[in-house]
Amino acid sequence: MSLLIIGGTGTLGRQIVKQALNEGYQVRCLARNLRRATFLKDWGAELVYGDLSLPETIPPALKGISLVIDAATIRPTDNYNSELIDWKGKIALIEAAKLANVKKFTFFSVLGASSNDTIPLIDLKLKVSKLLSQSGMSCTIFNCSGFFQGIINQYAIPVLENKTVWLLGKSNPIAYLDTQDAAVAVIKNLLDLEPGTKTLALIGKKFWTSEEVVGLCERLSGKEAKILYVPNILLGGLRRFFRFFEFTWNISDRLQFSELSIDSNKFNSSISEVDWTTERLSLEAYLQEYFGKIMKKLKETNYQQSKQSNEISFL
């Protein structure tokens, strides 16, 4: 069957593209920047121009499409207000999918969203989920917690480089998951074409606090982390400050989104979890492989530098 993927260049999206191609799907990727998405074409996907902020570009991309996976959201560096992409753009996409008689629509939300509807980005996710439930299409909404890949920049690299690791004063555990495991579950779910909307938790097998993740990084790297705690009240103050200026609304939205980890303790929600048929990679194994490669590379670099230094001294 033909599959349209939105957000295929993202951390999760690219793994979904790769898994779909491996499973034999005809994959088409909607891309705002075709040059940036060239690697998807190299993998075997078809690229088509489309921009969720320009509704008229969406219907042509859906021609001949049976399945849609929407893994798109704005990045903190994007020059768009979140409502333009995460709400108005989604409305246009869903309406176009209905007109194109799409058989199944897959969307991604956040675990614990229903208890955090005061956060603008979460509220938009909830509105889109409601819109999908009323669309008449077969839909699956995956509620995600966090992915391994995000830990590298947030924790692993700062620990390795002796830089400050910023932690919130109060945070709840996160069930991190490898994006490759997530992609396997998402593509498998495409076979479920039953009418109605299903909501599934797409999460790892263990919940981790920030301190536990940092501790794991310390143990595997052999280095001590420089931790600085950010008071929760300061986070809220920064969000309110940025909200005064229109050009920083996106920053404000992202800061408030981060408050999900402060306010939400509803991770053990009543929604069903994905029925895993394959073993999920553990965070310990993922970080052990990452640090193993890094430490090996550092040893090789140090050896080469030492060798060159000795040769110079000998001369």
Image: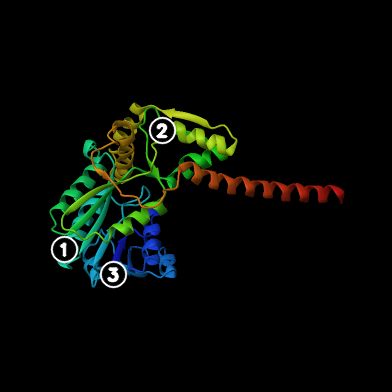
- Label 3 secondary element: strand
Q: On the rendered structure, is 21 left or right of 289?
A: left
Quadrant of the drawing holding the N terminus = bottom left
56 or 249, which lies in front? 56
The earlier-in-sequence mark between 2 and 1 is 1
Q: State the SS at label 2.
A: loop
Question: What residue type is disc 1 on?
Answer: Lys
In the rendering, which numbered label is found on residue 209?
Answer: 2
Q: Which residue is mark 1?
A: 98
Pointer 3 with pointer 2, Cβ within 8 A: no
The residue lying toward the viewer, choosing from 237 and 62, is 62
Residue 168 x %, y %: 39, 31
Residue sitting at 27 percent across and 39 percent down?
112
Q: Residue at x 37, y 28 (%)?
A: 170
Badge 2 density bin: few <14, some 14–19, many ≥20, Cα 10 Å: some
Front label number (2 vs 1): 2
**Alpha carbon separation for disc pair 2 and 1:** 41 Å
Element assignment for label 1: helix
Q: Earlier in the sequence, mark 3 or mark 2?
A: 3
